[in-house]
Image (cartoon, helix red, strand yellow):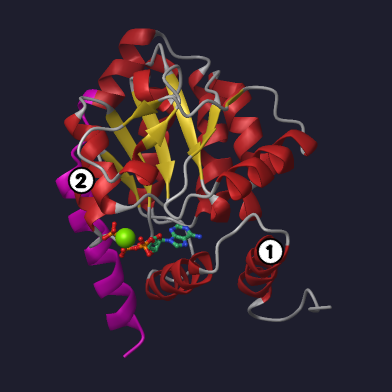
Amino acid sequence: MIPKSHPRYVSLMTRDKIVEGVRQGITGTQGLIAQGRGEAFDYLLGEKTTFGALHAEKVAAAMMLLAKRPVISVNGNVAALVPEEIIRLSEAVNAPLEVNLFYRTEERVNAIIRHLRAKGAKSICTKSDALIPSIEHERAKVDSSGIFSAEVVLVPLEDGDRCKALTDMGKIVIAIDLNPLSRTSQWANVTIVDNIVRAIPNITGFVKEHGKLDEDELQKLVEGFDNKKNLADAIDNILQHLSARK
Ligand code: ATP
Ligand code: MG
């Protein structure tokens, strides 16, 4: 048991969840490495949601509310770290969940679907009857009525190539990635440089707040967003945080 008073309590609990995900066959072993990389960037950002990330979360909420067909992509790390939170967001914006794995096996896809259902998920796209163009076969498999035909896709922790392929298909991609330099971050339309454990509840919070706004106001929020500036700000946040520690 990790005591709550431990200075790295949240980080250690998060690790436990990922390790447990691997044990349950939900998270791939490569997911452990991805989490480690994410943690390193989180440390550099001060392990908190920056002002810029919060704004990107606000914009992401508006985009998902405005979309006619939003879909939320779920991988093994997301399923292990934030299953309840992602289901809550899915319900709040009326976006089905779709399991989308980099190291895809049908066994792991099914294990994640069962895990999400056990946590109460009702809307899950489970077919794999369509392919994302120009991606290697197993990684390209998607649901024709899910990601394939979605207008806006939220991809927490996506791979760079697939992120680019989705934007090439004309979709709006919202990525959550603590590394502002990753190819995913660079290709996405909106990059939320924040830990998914903080980002998902924040987006859901903004969805509730946005309930008071009309479509024009939501549209204004979306139009005013500049992802290049957003990523440059994230890099500045890292520099400022490092300078303050010298
Ligand atoms: P890319 O293919 O986009 O260049 P990559 O190969 O550097 O990415 P991967 O290992 O494919 O990275 O994916 C892991 C990414 O997810 C990393 O950029 C990491 O920072 C990010 N990440 C890992 N855990 C979290 C988390 N809990 N919250 C947010 N981002 C995370
Ligand atoms: Mg990658």
Residue at image coords 30%, 70%:
238
Ligand 1 near label 2 (Cβ, under 8 Å)?
yes
Front residue of 38 and 113: 113
Q: Is residue 134 magenta?
A: no
Indicate the amino acid at tag 2: Trp
Residue at image coords 67%, 58%:
25
Which secondary structure, mark 1? Answer: helix
Identify the residue position indicated by label 1 in the image. Answer: 17
How far across and how far down the image is residue 148, in percent? 36, 24
User: Looking at the picture, does residue 232 appear above or below residue 7?
Assistant: above
How far across and how far down the image is residue 127, in percent? 52, 25
Report whether 158 appears left or right of 78: left
Identify the residue position indicated by label 2 in the image. Answer: 187
Of labels 2 and 1, earlier in sequence is: 1
Front residue of 136 and 4: 136
Q: Quadrant of residue 135?
A: top left
The N terminus appears in which quarter of the rendering? bottom right
Q: Residues within 10 Å of mark 1 (few under 14, many from 20)?
A: some
Question: Is residue 222 visible in this depiction of the protein?
Answer: yes
Q: Which residues are magenta?
A: 223-246
Which secondary structure, mark 2? Answer: helix
* Secondary structure mostly taken by the magenta-highlighted segment of the chain: helix
- Ligand 2 is in which quadrant of the figure? bottom left
Indicate the amino acid at tag 1: Lys
